[in-house]
Image: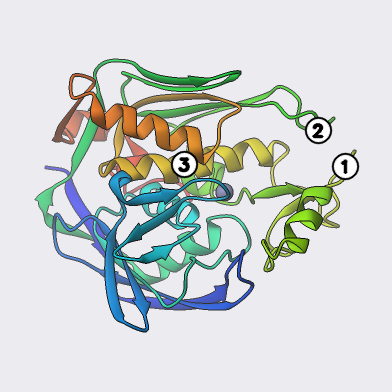
Amino acid sequence: MVAQRTLNHPIRCSGIGLHSGRKVELALRPAPENTGIVFHRRTERGLVAIPAHAEYVVDTRMCTTLGKDGATIATVEHLLSAMAGLGIDNAIIEVDGPEVPIMDGSSAPFVFLIQCAGIREQNAPKKVLRIVRKVEVEDGDKKCSLHPAAGFKVSYLLDYDHPLLRSRRTVVDFSTQAYTREVARARTFGFLHEIEALQKAGLALGGSLENAIVLDAYRVVNEGGLRYEDECVRHKILDTVGDLALAGHPVVGAFEGERTGHDMNHRLVRALLADESAWVIEELSEADARAGMAMAGATSSQPA
Ligand SMILES: [Zn+2]
């Protein structure tokens, strides 16, 4: 049996929210088998539990926002990506503000936090959502799909009208490539003129060169340059892993995306869940585990 996983110990950190610019306290706690990933949002009226599931998505314009009973929690995707990347099935994520802290704009600080807490195998079998029929969503020149495949693979085409970001495709096959090494360090990115406009409108107040790649019309503004040559495409893959986690189980299949973001990813997850002939929920087999389904956390010897 391939077992479900949770954290070994609770752990906490603080950081600033990208949009509010305010300090947020974050705590990650172990949770029993079959809990899934659940946000606990502290408000003046008490605590609201919001499961990390597609049915609680309330906004996908700037980031992915979950909401329930009047409470919302924004920018969940990088933390959910880290949880999925390390194969965590069950955890409580406690947050005292309206968004998850942005940290350095990647999921590496969350990976570090989870690794510090430690990962523990539990007594129930890990369940996965296996794609058995292709599901696709399209909107103009944007499209994304999920196909049947062994393991988990993400192929993404980034195509912006910018000299560094034209027609860039990157493929990460998680059966042979480690999330922690290939994806986790990729930071979010933005364009200088857009960031100025957002900040004038009172948004992205916490955004800075400390937590994003910033591009002007020709080049990367950050003094340190890029962490990967194709860092922006890898960040899109990081976001995709986090958005697909809202399907509720690790996906066994291949994702292909072109020019998509949180909005299209979420439409794809909804279309997938709505079509019960396109997937099956099953226990992760030892054979899948041997094939190195790293995203399901089946490979404990995953290279860091
Ligand atoms: Zn992102």
- Image point (9%, 52%), residue name: 124
- Image point (18%, 19%), residue name: 277
Which numbered disc, 3 or 2, marks the residue that appears first in the sequence? 2
In the picture, measured across the screen, residue 261 lies left or right of residue 297, that is right
Q: Using the image as rendered, state which of residue 257 and residue 179 is in the foreground.
A: 257
Where disc 2 sits, the SS reads: loop
Residue at the disc numbered 1 = 219
CB-based contact (under 8 Å), mark 2 and mark 1? yes
The mark closer to the camera, 3 or 2, is 2
Q: In the image, is residue 299 above or below residue 73?
A: above
| Residue 175 showing in the rendered view | no
Q: Position of residue 2 (x, y in %)?
A: 17, 43
Name the residue type under label 1. Arg
Quadrant assignment for the N terminus: top left
How far is mark 3 from mark 2, CA to CA?
Answer: 25 Å
Q: Position of residue 3 (x, y in %)?
A: 16, 49
Name the residue type under label 2. Leu
| Residue 288 showing in the rendered view | yes
Residue at the disc numbered 2 = 164
